[in-house]
């Protein structure tokens, strides 16, 4: 019976050893997979960190471009306001020139009318002079025989 108990205990120890050996092998496989997963996770983390840095740099560049665009828009608005102001001034100048042209046209018409009147007066004066010269000549003729 002692032999049976010893054989049973030896069988139990051998069975336990075989079971532990299988578990040990499985644990090493799990540890290897865990190590591989950790390495893959580290690589993925590095890749994600790199992508995050790239995204941050791209965001900073976009923000800088946005600020530059806003500044350009502000400058363009200033230029547009200046152009609109110049346009209003030019329109006012055109209005003033039209008024001056109308006044000049009116003055020209007045001057032409005055020239016409002066020509009429000149013609009347020339006619009066001719009449006076004719009268003087006749007066001289009439006065000459009496001397």
Image (tube, rainbow, N blue to C red):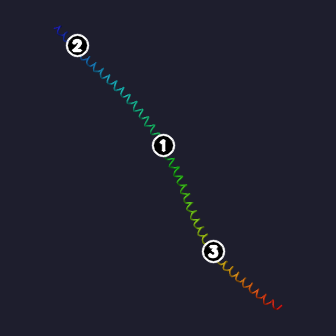
At a point 67% along the width and 78% down the height, the residue shown is 119
Q: Residue furthest left?
A: 1
Task: Report the disc number at residue 32.
Answer: none
Residue carrying label 3: 112
Q: Residue at x 20, y 12 (%)?
A: 11
**Quadrant that contains the C terminus:** bottom right
Residue 134 on image: x %, y %? 74, 85
Residue at image position (45%, 38%) is 58
- Closer mark to the observer between disc 1 and disc 2: 1
Q: CA distance from mark 3 to mark 2?
A: 142 Å
Using a 10 Å C-alpha cutoff, classify the residue at mark 3 as few (fewer than 14 neighbours), some (14 to 19) or many (20 or more).
Answer: few
Give the percent coordinates (x, y) of residue 19: 24, 17
Q: Nearer the viewer, residue 18 or 55?
A: 55
Image coordinates of residue 22 in percent, x first then y, are 25, 18
Mark found first going from the N terminus, 3 or 2: 2
In the rendered structure, which disc, 3 or 1, sits on the residue that comes first in sequence?
1
Q: Residues within 10 Å of mark 1 (few under 14, many from 20)?
A: few
Mark 1 or mark 2: whose residue is earlier in sequence: 2
Residue at the bottom extreme? 146
Q: Is residue 133 left or right of residue 81?
A: right
Tags 3 and 2 touching, CB below 8 Å = no
Query: SS class of the residue under badge 3?
Result: helix
Look at the numbered disc 2 and give the secondary structure of its residue: helix
Proximity of marks 1 and 2: CB atoms separated by less than 8 Å: no
What's the distance in space between the residues labelled 3 and 1, CA to CA? 68 Å
**Nearer to the camera, 125 or 41:** 125
Which numbered marker is on residue 14?
A: 2
Q: Which mark is residue 65?
A: 1
Mark 3 vs mark 1, foreground winner is 3
Name the image quarter holding the N terminus.
top left
């Amino acid at each position: 019976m002692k032999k049976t108990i010893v054989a049973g205990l030896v069988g139990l120890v051998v069975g336990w050893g075989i079971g532990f050996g299988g578990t040990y092998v499985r644990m090493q496989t799990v540890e290897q997979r865990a190590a591989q997963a950790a390495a893959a996770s580290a690589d993925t983390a590095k890749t994600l960190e790199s992508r995050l840095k790239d995204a941050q740099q791209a965001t900073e560049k976009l923000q800088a471009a946005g600020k530059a665009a806003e500044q350009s828009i502000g400058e363009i608005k200033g230029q547009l306001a200046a152009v609109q102001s110049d346009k209003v001034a030019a329109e006012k100048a055109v209005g003033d020139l039209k008024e001056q042209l109308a006044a000049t046209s009116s003055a020209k018409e007045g001057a032409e009318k005055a020239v016409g009147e002066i020509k009429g007066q000149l013609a009347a004066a020339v006619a009066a002079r001719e009449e006076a010269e004719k009268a003087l000549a006749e007066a001289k003729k009439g006065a000459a025989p009496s001397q």
